[in-house]
């Protein structure tokens, strides 16, 4: 989408933030994470150990509602 103020420039889309509904599930780096108490994302690392991520951690790593193929 071009920025009307500056012809020829592309306007970036806002970065999507993870959901805030408790018990929401998202995928990051091929692993599922569940939102607990609207404060932390809980899942497991590649070795099966519990892993807790903040919202910022999840955004930095990348996430989606679907598991990547």
Image: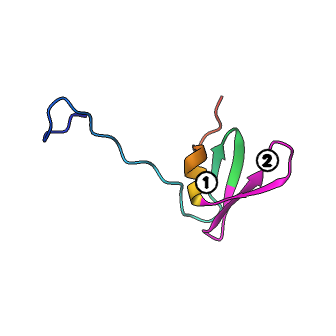
Label annotation for residue 11 = none
Residue 63 visible from this viewpoint? no
Q: How many marks?
A: 2
Residue closer to the observer: 10 or 26 = 10
Pointer 2 residue: 45
The answer to whether one can see residue 36 in this image is yes
Residue 23, picture quadrant: bottom right
| Image location of residue 43, percent across then percent down | 75, 53
In the displayed structure image, the side of residue 2 where residue 63 appears, left or right? right
Residue positioned 65% across, 37% down in the render: 67
For label 1, the crowd category at 10 Å Cα-Cα, with few meaning under 14, some 14 to 19 and many 20 or more, is few
Task: Specify the label residue 57 is tagged with.
Answer: 1
The residue under the point 65% across, 71% down is 37
Residue 38 image offset from top left, x and y in percent: 60, 68
Report the span colored magenta.
Answer: 34-54
Q: Please, which colouring scheme is shown?
A: rainbow
Q: Measure the C-alpha gap from mark 2 to mark 1.
A: 14 Å
State the image coordinates of residue 9 (x, y, percent, origin top left): 22, 33
């Amino acid at each position: 989408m071009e920025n009307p103020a500056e012809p020829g420039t592309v306007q970036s889309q806002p970065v999507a933030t993870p959901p805030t509904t408790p018990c929401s599930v998202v995928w990051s780096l091929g692993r599922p994470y569940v939102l607990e108490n609207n404060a932390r994302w809980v899942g497991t690392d590649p070795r099966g150990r519990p892993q807790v991520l903040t919202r910022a951690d999840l955004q930095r790593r990348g996430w989606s509602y679907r598991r990547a193929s």
